[in-house]
Amino acid sequence: MNANYSYLDNLENAYQNAETAAGSGRLPNGRYTAILNEVRLYAPDERRAYPRFSTSWIVTEGDYKGRLIYLTFNFNEKGFPYYNAFVKALGIEIPHLRDLPDRLGEFSGKIGQLTLAEQKSNPQYQNVYFDRLLGTGNPSDYRPAPAAAPGYPAGTDDSFTLVEDDGDLPF
């Protein structure tokens, strides 16, 4: 085969570099400043017989700026006290749990210090701890811009206008 397919190597290398730059994989153990991006409630399912309260945080500074940290609380006898302490530390008062679904928007934008530490029982996994509230902000200020595909400059407007024709299709 005489065709030059070096562009395929270039494409593969560009995606590998973009993936490395995005910093996929596990964050190192340590403390991070992050902004609460989103919260979700998950109903019990076939794997877990209890609801869960899940948060995603965007790291706001340092080498891992823009990366995500997830902190989840299980609504069971073991996890529920940690959820209560977390909400109190954020300064959000929700006297009745039934009101939580309507109040999820109040969590977004809280800036906090989080600690990642490997589990003593299984170092393959990390625990995430909320240490303290530092302030508030706008999560969109910290979301990384989507990476451009190789050969397609970042910020390029990819929209187009469809022009109606007289009915003749070019194919």
Image: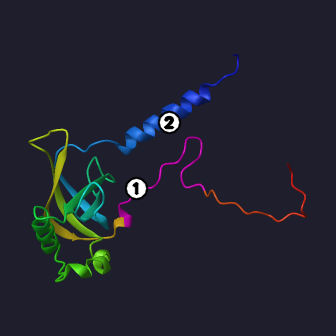
Q: Quadrant of residue 168?
A: bottom right
Q: Which mark is residue 14?
A: 2
In the image, 93 versus 50, the foreground residue is: 50
Please report the bounds of the magenta region as a residue range.
140-156
Q: Quadrant of the N terminus?
A: top right
Disc 2 marks a residue whose amino acid type is Ala
Instruction: Estimate how packed mark 1 is, as few (under 14), some (14 to 19) or many (20 or more) residues with alpha carbons within 10 Å.
Output: few
Disc 1 marks a residue whose amino acid type is Pro
Q: Secondary structure at mark 1?
A: loop
In the image: residue 7, left or right of residue 62: right
Q: Is residue 167 above or below residue 109?
A: above
Coordinates of residue 30 in the picture (x, y in percent)? 15, 48
**Mark 2 → mark 1, Cα distance in angstroms:** 18 Å
In the image, 73 versus 131, the foreground residue is: 73
Coordinates of residue 24 in the picture (x, y in percent)? 35, 42
In the image: residue 130, left or right of residue 51: left
Q: Which label's residue is closer to the chain start, 2 or 1?
A: 2
Give the residue displayed 10% in from the left and 67% down from the top.
Answer: 81
